[in-house]
Every structure is written in structure tokens, then in C-alpha cells.
Image (cartoon, rainbow, N blue to C red):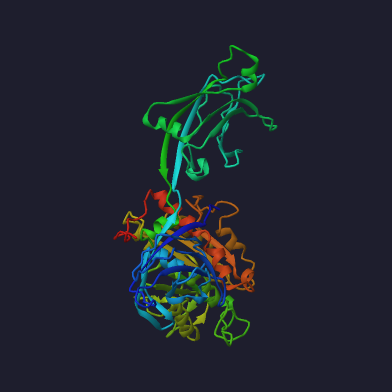
Amino acid sequence: MADCVSKVELSISCTDLLDKDVGSKSDPLCVLLQSSGKDSWTELARTERLKNSSSPSFSQRLRVDYHFESVQNLKLGVYDIDNKSSDLGDDDYLGGVELTLGQIVASKTLTRPLQLKKGKPAGKGSITITAEEIKDNRAIQLEFEAKNLDKKDTFGKSDPFLEFFKQGDDGKWQLVHRTEVVKNNLSPTWKKFSVPMQTFCSSDLDRPLKVDCSDYDSDGTHDLIGSFTTKVSELQKAGSGSPVTFDCIHSEKQKKKKSYKNSGVVTVKSCKMLTQYSFLNYVMGGCQINFTVGIDFTGSNGDPRSPNSLHYMSPDGLNQYLSALWSVGHVVQDYDTDKLFPAFGFGAKLPPDYQAANHEFALNFNPTNPYCKGIEGIIEAYRMVMPQLRLSGPTNFSPIINHVSSIATQAAQSNNASQYFVLLILTDGEITDLDQTRDAIVRASRLPLSIIIVGVGPADFKAMELLDGDDGVLKSTVGEAVSRDIVQFVPYRQFKDAPQASLAKSVLAEVPNQLVSYFKMRGLEPPKPATAAPKS
């Protein structure tokens, strides 16, 4: 998996802080804490202290690791510092705010009133938090060719490939890229490749690089043809249309032979800087993540009145369906501004006539407005309709996938990166329309959509694992492959006794890469935020 951990930098400013110092304004400092469970908080960072300021803008930014798949609860506290000790226990508290990192990055800039404690405002004091991702999102794209390389094989010519190394801070060479092998060719051209700048040269254009050109041998004893050293700032000269050429030098040969010139020459045909956008670039640019839920009400779940049924409500009003919904929905809801989530059921017969089974009905029984307010709204609708449904069958997934696909198709026509869709299907796994579902997923893989399937109950879920193309590429009934991997399946039983957050971590971990891969495939850049973030 790509590195999903991004670092986010928060800049903090406040207005109208309480004045705790007699005859002068407070001397504020802001501290950032992250929840480490129940009521415990861990300090991550703090700003500098500013003297005599009731509306400070702190220059020291606060850094925090960002994980999309977790709810990261943060607390910002502002204190009036009147002594030299770093302990805040003896300093006046000017107010604080609790929020999630998801809320901050989804808004990019957020202003909240400061509170002394829940429900008690700190005068007129307010705090403004602006988030920025810390990441070099550039990549370098290079194309190399060589001429007149030394012949290393007794029969036939050499089979050359290149290896690129950057010099680590410890002076050692670290491999950053290896090209393909070009068979039997002393003047090869290698395929264009791109590597993130962070990886290629630690984002330092003058960091020493070493390139080895070797002759490939299938037994792993590759022979060095020759090497050269360079740096990105030198390779970049090829970008302006003048090729950059290096002598490939084999130092042993050079020592032995006075007349030795080189073992061939390697030329940079092209060098280009590309921008590789990240998940946060899209979210902070204003891309909305629209969350839809589909719940399986087929007969194989068992009679909801029986304690053995997967839809049976335990005395605490919960079951596996609701626990899974809460765990995943709780994370995703921060990225959807209106918090209105369409929720559907499938596989049940509906009142008043209980005729044929319905494979895509609004959970709130309002087909023209299937939206529920927040995750709580979906749970409320579920509890309301459960006693009125008759569980039936068969278990068809394709109607609800096609329904969300049709909305995603409309969004995709706007040709900008403003909408992405996540469909959560909660099921006991006994799927009937496997072929139609495979076709629906292959079509959906060309749309701004990810599908998460949580398997509830004890079934073996073989069919579900087939849909999550991790072992092989999922193909439609006519053999067309998915254009990108969009399905993530997990059985709920693996997480039954784990902390509630662990299910969401597992199913949502792939969504950031799926979102980026879709917009990259379409060549769409992150939206430009409507308003520029205030300068701090």
C-alpha cells in the first residue's frame, strides 16, 4: 500500500482572549492534544508564547500525523503563561476546543468559539485553525538511452539495465529505482519512468546520485558495465531540450588501461517534474465524499424476533449490522458537509401488501427522499422499519450498486474532482446475482466510487472474496477487467471483540488511494478552494 500517513501542519490564531493579567493583556500559548482513549489526552505539540496579546497569531505551527481511516479526536487549549515552567497546571486556562482532525481537513479553515468547559464559553474568545499538508507532491519523470555499451556476454550482446542510488545522510548509497532489462542490445532505450522526488533524492536537487549500468544474468550474478554520478539539478538540463550525456566508467578497467575512455555513454533523453496529488489535496480542495448505505434484509439473516437472527436487537439496542454501520460511518461523516446519507435496504417484502421482494428500497420508506440525517438518522430509520419488514430473498447486490453508479455517473460528467462516492453494503453474504454484480462492479470501476462490503454473521463469504479482487483481477461476464480496484471486503467476525475503531481502519484504509487513482485516471486536478485560506 502507498504511504497513507500524511503530515498535517496546523496554524492557529485566536481573537478576543480573556485577559487574566492585571493591567495588561494575557501572554497566550496554544497546546495540541490527541485523545489516547476514554478521558486521557497526549500532548503532541505547542506554539510559542506571545506577550500581551488578546488576538494572537502563532507562528509556530503544530504538526500531526493524519490517518483517514481513524477518527482522530484533538483538543486545542489556550493558556496564559506567567512563569518559566513548562507544566501548564499552574497557568490560567483561557479556553479550548475539541474537534476531529477530519473536520479540520475537510473544512481546511475552521473557526470555533473557545470554551472554558462544555457549555461554558470563554467570553467572546474564538480560535481559528488552518490545515496544510506537509508533503513534496512532485515526482521526477526520466527517460534514458545508452550507446556503445561494452559487450559482457560470450554469446550475444549485453542485456543492460540501470540502477539509481541516492546518497543517504550517512553517506551510504540507497537504491531508489531499477529499470527493466533490455535484452541483447548495446545501444538500448529504456522505458520512461517516474519516481516521487522524496524517494528519488529526498527532495534535494543537489543530493549526490549514482547510476550503475549492469548486464543482467538470470543466475543473479549481474556484471557491472559502468557507473557515473550526477544530481537532479544536472539531469534537469535535459528538460530544456539539450540531452545530457554521461561516460559510463568501469573503475577497474580505467585503472588497467591508459587509453580507456569509457564503457559506453548514457544519455538523459528527457527529464520532467510532475505533480502527484494526494488524498488530502483533493479533500482540502473541497472534494466531497458522499456516503451511501445498503443493508441486507434477506431471509438467510434469520427471523429478527429470534435471538439467533443477525437482525435481532440485543437489550442494548445493538447488533452486528448497527455496530459495523456506526464504526465505518463515524469516520466517513466528517468528509460530507450536509451529513445527509441515503440509506437503502434490499431483499425484504414491504408493507402494506408484502408482495414481491424489493431489492432497493429507501430505509426511511420515503423513495423520493431517502436521506437520513447523520449516522444516528440511519440507525433510527433501521429501528423504525425493522418490525415492519418481512425478510425474503434472493440476495441481489447489483440494483443498489447500479443505483449509486447512476448518481456517480452524473457527478463524473462535471469533469472536476468535486464528488466521490463510498457505498457501504452490510450483508450476511449469501449473494444470488453474482454475475450481474461482477458486471456492475466492472462498470463502477470507471466511476468516482468505492464499494465497501462488511460480511455479518458466520457465512464463509467465498463469493465476497471473489469480488474483492485482491487475489486476482475481477472480470465481468464478458471478460472485461476492472479499470481499478474499488471493492474492499471484510468479515465483521474478525473485529467482533476488537476495539470499535479497528473495523473502520481495515475497510477504509484503501479509500484514499482509490479516490486518488480515479481522479488520476481521469486526469483531474484537485478543485481550487472557493476562498483562499486566511493568511496567518
Residue 433 visible here: no
Tell me if residue 115 can be seen: yes
Is 528 or 460 nearer to us in this picture?
A: 528
List x then y, in percent, for residue 247. Answer: 52, 22
Q: Nearer the viewer, residue 197 or 125?
A: 125
What residue do we see at 42% from left, 80% from top?
Answer: 116
Locate the C terminus and report the quarter of the image it occupies: bottom left
Picture quadrant of residue 502: bottom right
Residue furthest out toward the left: 531
Q: Is residue 137 above or below residue 31?
A: above
Q: Is residue 521 left or right of residue 300?
A: left
The one of 295 and 158 positioned closer to us in this rendering = 158
For the point 51% across and 40% down, which residue is it?
Answer: 201
In the rendered image, residue 169, in percent from the top left (x then y), is placed at: 57, 42
Q: Is residue 252 left or right of residue 93?
A: right
Task: Identify which residue, 433 or 515, lies in the foreground.
Answer: 515
Left or right: 283 with respect to 314? left
Residue 502 vs 440, above or below: the answer is below
How many marks are shown on the rendered structure?
0
Residue shown at 33% from the left, 74% from the top? 16
Q: Quadrant of residue 60?
A: bottom left
Q: Is residue 477 above or below residue 116?
A: above
Percent x, y of residue 404: 41, 65
The residue furthest front is 23
Q: Position of residue 32 (x, y in %)?
A: 48, 67
